[in-house]
Image (spheres, helix red, strand yellow):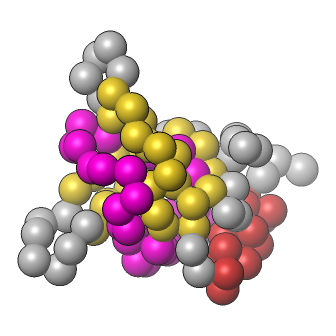
Amino acid sequence: MNRNKADSQIPVVVTTSLDLPPLWGRLAALSPTEAELVSHFELPAGKMVALSFELGGAGFEDVRARIKKAARDADGYYNYELAFVDPGQSALLKSAIGQASPR
């Protein structure tokens, strides 16, 4: 995955269900099609989540992603590999990542 060097460790709000309060975490890597999420909260592989975060001055709300892989590290954090599922949202991310990257 191409790491987004402009905004490393992006704070993110993670919504798992309308019935539950949102969770939090950080995006350790971001590309238009996938991301790496680090959080204290345990979620199963295969689960759909919605992410809200800021990138390059633009706000992204409810970016839908599926958890591809989940693993817990030695420090108790959960590391997730996410795949974005909406091509329109991926196109917007691609544009924002291109604008946020150092030239």
Residue 40 appears at what percent x and percent y? 24, 37
The residue shown at (73%, 78%) is 91
| Residue 92 seen in this snapshot | no
Q: Is residue 48 left or right of residue 7?
A: left
Q: Is residue 32 left or right of residue 76?
A: right
Q: Residue at x 78, y 52 (%)?
A: 101
Residue at the far right in the pictured view? 103
Q: Is residue 94 above or below residue 31?
A: below
Give the extent of the magenta segment: 35-64
Considering depth in this image, is 95 or 31 the residue closer to the camera?
31
**Residue 102 among magenta residues:** no
Location of the N terminus by quadrant is top right
In the figure, residue 5 lies in which quadrant? top right
* Position in image of residue 7 (x %, y %): 60, 47
Residue 21 shows up from this direction: yes
Q: Residue at x 62, y 56 (%)?
A: 34
Tell me: residue 40, above or below residue 47. above
Q: Is residue 1 left or right of residue 53?
A: right
In percent of width and height, residue 62 lies at: 41, 77
Q: Residue furthest front?
A: 46
In terms of image quadrants, where is residue 19? bottom left
Comparing 8 with 83, the one in front is 83
Q: Residue at x 33, y 27 (%)?
A: 72
Q: Main secondary structure of the magenta part?
A: strand
Give the image location of residue 87, x and y in percent.
67, 81
**Is 59 situated left or right of 92 in this image?**
left
Q: Residue furthest bottom?
A: 88
Count the marks: how many? 0
